[in-house]
Image: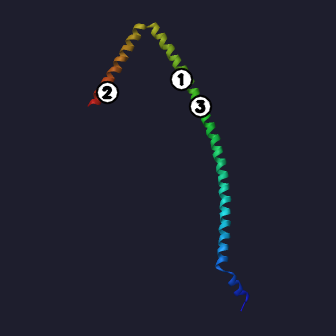
Amino acid sequence: MNTPSTRSLRSSTPASYADEAMNGAESALDSTRQLASQVIGKASEKVRDLGFGAKDLASRGVDVASEAAAAAQKQLSRYADVTGRYVSQQPVKSVLIAVAAGAVIAGLLVAARRRNRL
């Protein structure tokens, strides 16, 4: 009674099923490895591109900050020149303004201390 159908049933042993499952698992693992490799490659390219973009952005930020600092320095220099001229032209008035400003600041400090003690 060795018909072809019984022979195929006999050759389909648990070991052959295990081999087929192992081959399928290895194939799936290889596919997963290839896909992971492709994803990592693409991610590396994106990270590299982002790095170049970040460097460019940082460079532009430094340039803008440097220009702003230079403009602020020029403005402060102008204010210092104008103030110096005013003080040299009107020294008594300048001293009185400075004394008044000092008194206001001292008054604010005293009031703030009193408020903190309460």
Q: Nearer the viewer, mark 1 or mark 2?
A: 2
Q: Element type at marker 3?
A: helix
Q: Amino acid at mark 1?
A: Ala
- Give the number of the disc on residue 40: none
Q: Does label 2 or label 3 sit earlier along the sequence?
A: 3
Which corner quadrant of the image does residue 105 belong to?
A: top left
Which corner quadrant of the image does residue 35 belong to?
A: bottom right
Q: Amino acid at mark 2?
A: Ala
Residue behind mark 2: 112
Q: Residue shown at 46%/7% (left/top)?
A: 89
Q: Does label 1 or label 3 sit earlier along the sequence?
A: 3
7 relative to 45, above or below = below
Q: Does label 1 or label 2 sit earlier along the sequence?
A: 1
53 relative to 95, above or below = below
Q: Amino acid at mark 3?
A: Val
44 relative to 76, above or below = below
| Cα distance between the residues tagged 2 and 3 | 39 Å
Q: Position of residue 5 (x, y in %)?
A: 71, 87
Residue behind mark 3: 62
Q: Element type at marker 1?
A: helix
Observer-nearest of 86 and 12? 12
Q: Element type at marker 2?
A: helix
Q: Residue shown at 53%/23% (left/top)?
A: 72
Q: Is residue 51 left or right of residue 104?
A: right
Q: Are marks 1 and 2 in contact (CB under 8 Å)?
A: no
